[in-house]
Structures are given as structure tokens and as C-alpha cells.
Image: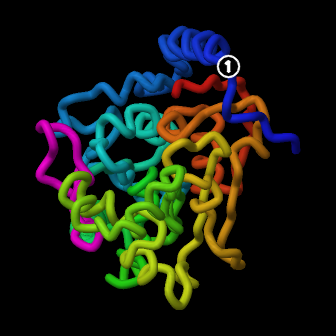
Amino acid sequence: MRQFSVARSRLWLLVLAAACVLAGSVAATSASAAYPVKYTIAHVLSLDPDVAPPGANHWDCRPTAAHPRPVILVHGLTANQHSNWGTLSPLLANNGYCVFTLNYGGPPLLGFSYGYGAMEDSAAELGEFVDRVRAATGAATVDLVGASEGATMPHYYLKFLRGDAKVTRFVGLVPAVKGTSLFGLSALVQFLGIDGLVAATVSPAGKELLAGSSFLRNLNAGGLTMSSVKYTSIVTIYDEAVTPYKNGQLPAGPNVTNITLQRACPIDFAEHIGTSFDPNALRLVLNALDPVHAKSSCRFVPTVF
């Protein structure tokens, strides 16, 4: 497949951004849908992290035979439960899932932005939330869907905190399991020996997400995945945060599926943040959670950044 150049013209970006705004203003709903589903990046403007996204955190929800496991959505760095999952949460609820979301890695910056804490600590927070969901729903195991840091940090929980006994499927959108170079920043940080400065000015999680960090070396040592968990990793070639984008792909294995979004849909130009609100990417998430009823989706999606 011929890959499109990331360096598109400024005019092209403006046209696509305008198209995104227009497309995002339309709610895609069906007659039986309980919640409107809006495929728009405008969800990132949510400043109230204490409000769960539509369809999530109904603690009286009980899984059905069709969808026997609750789905926990794990947001990314700088995001919160509402800003990251304003599209996927109602989409899953409308498809019959019990959906749960959390904030982790606080205290929040500016009162609404989470995910900054050390990922070892965030993994423990996730583990506590998984146990709470299992106790409330009666489910033996859950499925996880994460984005960015939320598609990376749970690997620590699965591998080192015995989370593999409590999770059946883990679907990651634009993960950074091999870290990000941020176009060379990680190499510069290591060369100059300023890891401590990065941790202080960015965040412990930000430092850990840089390629070559001690956290990622420990996470990948001896193998990343656990045999009892089914993994799906979804990456985009236009990722501007995880560079190179292939750093989000998992080691090959019988329980691992790596998907490049543009191989499934060449007219999808979504970048890092946009994948959480992308109809094609989220269709791939639904397929990963319920492969028996998988469907194809390839709609034009413009880039934003």
C-alpha cells in the first residue's frame, strides 16, 4: 500500500479540518439507540472529569450472554474519562455492553487533566477499579480498551499485578509499548542526561513513555504479553505523538492482532488523538471485542492536527 506523506499542504489541512468540524456536528444514531453517538474530536474539550461519558458507570448494569464481560475504558495522558470516551462509551452501551470509565494518575492538572502519575501507581489504581467493577457486575473477568498511555500502562497491570487473571481482552488504540521518540526528543534527553528534568517538568508518566525509559525496558523484558489475554493493537501511520508509529505494535504471537488503520481504510487520515473518535477505528474496537460479529467500515476521515 502506498503511504500518503504526513507533510501535506497547509491548505489541505485547513480543508480537512473544516470538513471534520462539519462531520463531527452530526450525531450518528439509530432508532433503537439509547445514547447519541457523535464522532467528533470536540469531546476533548470536556472540562468536568467527574462526569462519566454517556452510557458509562451504571453500576446496576449486568452483563448479558451476548456480552458477558464489562468493558473498562482507560484514558490517555492529559485526558480524562469524559474527554477521551465521549464517542466510544455510548457506542458500546448502545451495542449492549456494560461500560465503565475511570480517572487515574492524579492529582489532575488544572482540575481536569489526568494521567501524569507514574504508570506503576496508575496500574495499581486500574487494578482496584477492575476489582470494583467485577464485584458490582458479578463478572469473573473484564475487557479493557485503552488509548495512548491508557493502551500502554495496563500492560504493567496485566504482567506484574496479576491482572491477566482478571482480563480476557485488551484493545489498545495508538499505544506506545516501545515508547515514543517524539521526533528525537527521547534520544536528546538521554544524551544530555536530563531525565530528572523531564520528569519534573512533564510528568513521571511522560518520562516513562519516552523510548528507552527504564519503565519500558522493564515492561518489555522477557516478553510483553500474557498467554491468557487476547490482545489487539490499532495504530495509525499519521501518529504525531507516538513516533515512529510502529512503536505501538505488539510482538507477534498467537493471541496478538496488530492492525494499521490505513490498511483497513486507506482514506482514513486520523492522527493520534483522532482515533478515539474515528468511526473506522472504533469499528475495529467493536470487532476486537466481538470478533464473531465483526463488520467492515471505511469512511473518509480527515486529519485535525
Q: Secondary structure at mark 1?
A: loop
Q: Indicate the position of residue 173 as horizontal and vertical percent values.
A: 53, 51
Residue 185 showing in the rendered view: yes
x 58%, y 49%: residue: 285
Q: Is residue 105 magenta-colored?
A: yes
Query: 115 or 196, which is in the foreground?
Result: 196
Compared across the picture, whether 276 is left or right of 131 comes to right
Identify the magenta region: 103-122
Asked if residue 240 is positioned above or below residue 305 in the image, the reply reads: below
Asked if residue 86 is positioned above or below residue 180 in the image, the reply reads: above
Q: Which residue is mark 1?
A: 9
Quarter of the rendering occupied by the N terminus:
top right
Dot 1 amino acid type:
Ser
Asked if residue 280 is positioned above or below residue 164 in the image, the reply reads: above
Compared across the picture, whether 255 is left or right of 243 comes to right
Assess disc 1: are there few (<14), some (14-19) or many (≥20) residues with their C-alpha within 10 Å of its C-alpha: few
x 42%, y 83%: residue: 218
x 18%, y 58%: residue: 200
